[in-house]
Amino acid sequence: MVQQNTILRIPAKGLCTAMALAICVTGSAFGADLAQVKECGTLRHLGVPYANFVTGSGDGMDVELMKLFAKHLGVEYQYVQTSWGNVIGDLSGKKVKPVGEEVEVLGEVPVRGDIIANGLTILPWRQKVVDYSEPIFPTQVWLIARADSPMKPIKPSGDIQRDIAAVKALLKGRSVLTKPKTCLDPSLHGLEEAGAVVKLFEGALNDFAPAVINRDAESTILDVPDALIALEKWPGQIKVIGPISPLQGMGCGFAKTSPQLRQAFNRFLDQCKKDGTYLRLVRKYYPAVFAYYPEFFKGQV
């Protein structure tokens, strides 16, 4: 008797469910899009504890925003803690190394989440592997020094490039804390070319300001959200010297394979801006930002 090969036929809906379950349980080589997130029933929020976006205590501006987005989609919310070194791979499935504004793909890694939300600065190298939402927060990189540093804050000229040049002129021979593979990577800001003594910091971004206060270095570069928190936490102990970068934006990160999830979030964000939810969260976690970047919030405040 000749035994015929048997073909297993799975209904399309069942196949989608099986794919979604595989993504939820085992991870995958690609990011889940909107349909898979809904099938799975869970939105996995990749977050790095940072400033007031993800406090590490179960709250933060981005934590609240992601919980509201999950509720909007009709799914459960799950926080997946990661690190700055791993967060891009945890979303994209690709372990990458930034090389200027390009990236080198080093290999594949399991996907652990559906969306990055922790104050993720929009940088050219990240855009090679991640798609961003509409900007959700303004930022810029500032030079911060101890209050007793002989470096004095520059007087704004009205020309950002002139202001950056004035700040860099103060750096020759002075130590500056930085962190590779983040928005504080020294290669992004020409610190060594300016004559700064670059010190690579192994701690968390939240620890930069206290490290400067403890004299690990005379100064550090910080982006605006972290600087605002530091000025509030340690009044009179640090000072802002001036900008190291032009105005930048922060957004949520999505895998290149998740265009519909990204579009759904952008629509949700727009609604949050219209109904006042977005501004309520900004005022709760970053009340001082309106004084520094009124143009970003124009028409909303």
Image (cartoon, grey):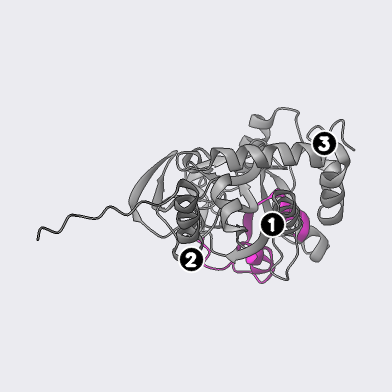
Q: Going 77% across and 54% down the picture, which residue do you hit?
A: 228
Question: Which of the two labelled residues, at mark 1 and mark 2, occupies the earlier sequence position?
Answer: 2
| Of pointers 3 and 2, the one earlier in the residue sequence | 2
Please give the label number shown on residue 145. 1
The residue wearing badge 3 is 297
In this picture, is 288 found above or below 245?
below
Kindly identify the amino acid type of the residue bearing the numbered disc 3.
Phe
Q: Given this view, does label 1 or label 2 mark the residue nearer the observer? A: 2
Label annotation for residue 301: none
Inspect the image, locate mark 1, and give the three-letter code of the amino acid beneath it.
Ala
Of 164 and 255, the residue lying toward us: 255
* Residue contact at pointers 1 and 2, CB within 8 angstroms: no
Q: Nearer the viewer, residue 104 or 174?
A: 104
Going by the image, does 215 lie left or right of 26?
right
Q: In the rendered image, is residue 48 in sight?
A: yes
Q: Earlier in the sequence, mark 1 or mark 3?
A: 1
Magenta stretch?
Answer: 200-229
Q: Nearer the viewer, residue 176 or 39?
A: 39
Residue type pointed to by label 2 = Val
- Can you give x and y, in whole percent of width and height, for residue 124 in the image? 50, 37
Q: What secondary structure is marked by label 2?
A: helix
